[in-house]
Image (cartoon, grey):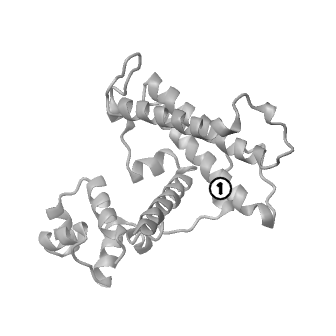
Amino acid sequence: MSTDFSRIMTLLRKERRLSQKKAAEDLGVSQGLLSHYEKGKRECGLDFLVRAADYYNVSCDYLLGRSPEPQGKTISIDELPEDDPNQRDKVTPGSVMIAFNKKLINNSLSVCFSLLSKCRSATVIKEISGYLMLAVYKVFRYLYSANPENDQNFFMIDKTVASLGSNAAMNLCESKISAAAAGKALDGEDAISNPGELAADTRSLAEEYPRYYSSMVNLIKNSEARIKALDSEAK
């Protein structure tokens, strides 16, 4: 059974504000057995998997972590909305991956900046914006510098300093973001005072961002796959 199953089962129950006892009764199992499923101590059978999928109105693939979409669908490039309808990508076989990932990232950023507008913290807005700008700066500089004939005077900072300097600046941004998100105002900074305004779950995100939700959950899945791969390599 997928290791995601226990996490998703718990997430769905809590999102619907169901007690473990109530969910167990509705699903026809003991509370103890459901607890084992949610903690990953026991593997369920196919019959329970189908029952749970029907109960939470999601697909079996979603419960197993095989799809980031609750209904289990796989998105294609045509199903992702354009971030700018006036500048649609001309998709050719060689540019499909670029066009797909561009939409995935741009649409996900739309969700992030919408949430950013609710945080009411100048520090968070400033530092997240700075962090993203630095990431784009690094990417652009790598691409620009790939051609040794390109004039490096385009940049003020030498390339031997730029990469590690960018990392240091991004780490500082992240430190300030982390503190502000935890409600701790550093000297000369502010913090998120009402985290309740940022409340979200899978259902509320899908309802508030119907055009961009698929992009966001797919970006999360792809990112966490990369993180898990690092753990596997370390072992």
Q: Residue at x 66, y 52 (%)?
A: 103
Res 7 quadrant in image = bottom left
Q: Which residue is drawn at 68% across and 49% down?
A: 82
Q: How crowded is mark 1: few (under 14 residues within 10 Å), some or many (20 or more)?
A: some
- Whether residue 166 sits left or right of residue 44 in the image: it is right
Task: Please provide percent x and percent y for residue 122.
Answer: 47, 22
Camera-side residue of 68 and 39 = 39
**Extreme residue toward the top, this view:** 188
Question: Residue 95: percent from the left, percent from the top?
Answer: 77, 60
One can see residue 69 in this view: no
Image quarter for residue 41?
A: bottom left
- In the image, what residue type sits under mark 1? Asn
The residue depicted at 13 percent of the width and 73 percent of the height is 30
Quadrant of the image containing the N terminus? bottom left
Residue sitting at 47 percent across and 51 percent down? 206
- 181 and 72: which one is in front? 181
Which residue is most to the bottom?
46
**Left or right side of 63 for 94:** right
Q: Mark 1 points at which residue?
A: 101
In percent of width and height, residue 227 lies at 46, 59
Residue located farthest toward the right when viewing the structure as drawn: 149
**Which structural element holds mark 1?**
helix
Q: Is residue 141 visible?
A: yes
Left or right for 162, reference 117: right
